[in-house]
Image: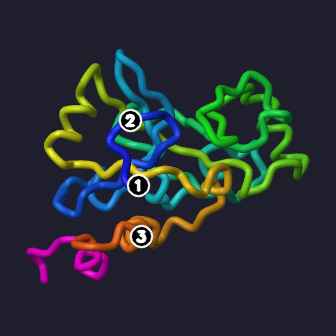
């Protein structure tokens, strides 16, 4: 079911018409925060070629790093579903939390108490200023969908996630599910 109201915890699915934008073409974004001052989200379906150990050698894990968005790509962010283990987390919704005490998080990963289904790391985030996301919604850049996966979205495979979401929308969107990423190269 497609919603018209923006609420944190929802998914923003890039309209198939977003072509040529390296950050947002075929993106699915978890909306982490939304209020009158603006919005923040993380692209959840664009893995990078790095692992957490590549960026932070003191962490003994090979969790993938994702491109969270074009803003502050030199900063590491994370979402998780274990607030009882990571102090100072901020609830997004549906049992998904953002951030928290990073030193505790590193120790928990190294002790094997956090696995890849509990946490997802991002370089950068997606941000919108006041009313910017609403304007993009009016120009049909995004489809709002509920996060039916709740906190299980963290472990959800990313390779075909946009296509899966488009297929779930059905109707006129189904034709786009098998279209090449850049139709001009077809």
Q: In this picture, is 86 found above or below 162?
A: above
Q: In this picture, is 97 found above or below 64?
A: above
For marks 2 and 3, the one nearer the N-term is 2
In the rendered structure, the answer to whether residue 128 lies left or right of residue 34 reads: left
Residue 164: x %, y % from top left: 44, 71
| Residue placed under numbered mark 3 in the picture | 168
Which of 51/157 is in front? 157
Residue 22: x %, y % from top left: 26, 55
* Residue positioned 42% across, 66% down in the render: 165
For marks 1 and 3, the one nearer the N-term is 1
For the C terminus, which image quadrant?
bottom left
How is this picture coloured? Answer: rainbow
Residue 73: x %, y % from top left: 42, 37
Determine whether the residue tagged by mark 2 lies in a helix, strand or loop: loop
The magenta segment: 174-186
For the N terminus, which image quadrant?
bottom left
* Residue positioned 31% across, 61% down in the render: 26
Q: In this picture, is 64 found above or below 179?
A: above
| Residue placed under numbered mark 2 in the picture | 6
**Mark 1 → mark 3, Cα distance in angstroms:** 13 Å
For marks 2 and 1, the one nearer the N-term is 2
* Residue positioned 18% across, 71% down in the render: 182
| Residue placed under numbered mark 1 in the picture | 28
Secondary structure, magenta segment, majority class: helix
**In the rendered structure, does residue 169 fall within the stretch colored magenta?**
no
In the rendered structure, the answer to whether residue 23 lies left or right of residue 114 reads: left
**In the rendered structure, does residue 181 fall within the stretch colored magenta?**
yes
**Mark 2 → mark 3, Cα distance in angstroms:** 19 Å
Determine whether the residue tagged by mark 3 lies in a helix, strand or loop: helix
């Amino acid at each position: 079911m497609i919603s018209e109201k923006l609420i944190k915890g929802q998914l923003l699915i890039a309209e198939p018409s977003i072509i040529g934008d390296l950050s947002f073409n075929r993106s699915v974004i978890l909306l982490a925060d939304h209020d009158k001052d603006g919005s923040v989200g993380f692209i959840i379906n664009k893995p990078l070629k790095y692992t957490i150990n590549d960026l932070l050698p003191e962490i003994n894990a090979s969790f993938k790093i994702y491109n969270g968005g074009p803003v502050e790509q030199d900063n590491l962010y994370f979402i998780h579903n274990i607030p009882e283990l990571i102090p100072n987390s901020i609830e997004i919704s549906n049992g998904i939390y953002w951030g928290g005490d990073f030193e505790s998080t590193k120790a928990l990963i190294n002790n094997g108490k956090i696995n890849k289904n509990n946490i997802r790391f991002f370089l950068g985030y997606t941000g919108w200023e006041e009313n910017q996301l609403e304007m993009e919604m009016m120009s049909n850049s995004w489809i709002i969908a509920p996060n039916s996966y709740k906190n299980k979205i963290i472990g959800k495979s990313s390779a075909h996630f946009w296509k899966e979401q488009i297929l779930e929308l059905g109707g006129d969107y189904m034709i786009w599910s098998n279209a090449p990423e850049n139709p001009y190269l077809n």
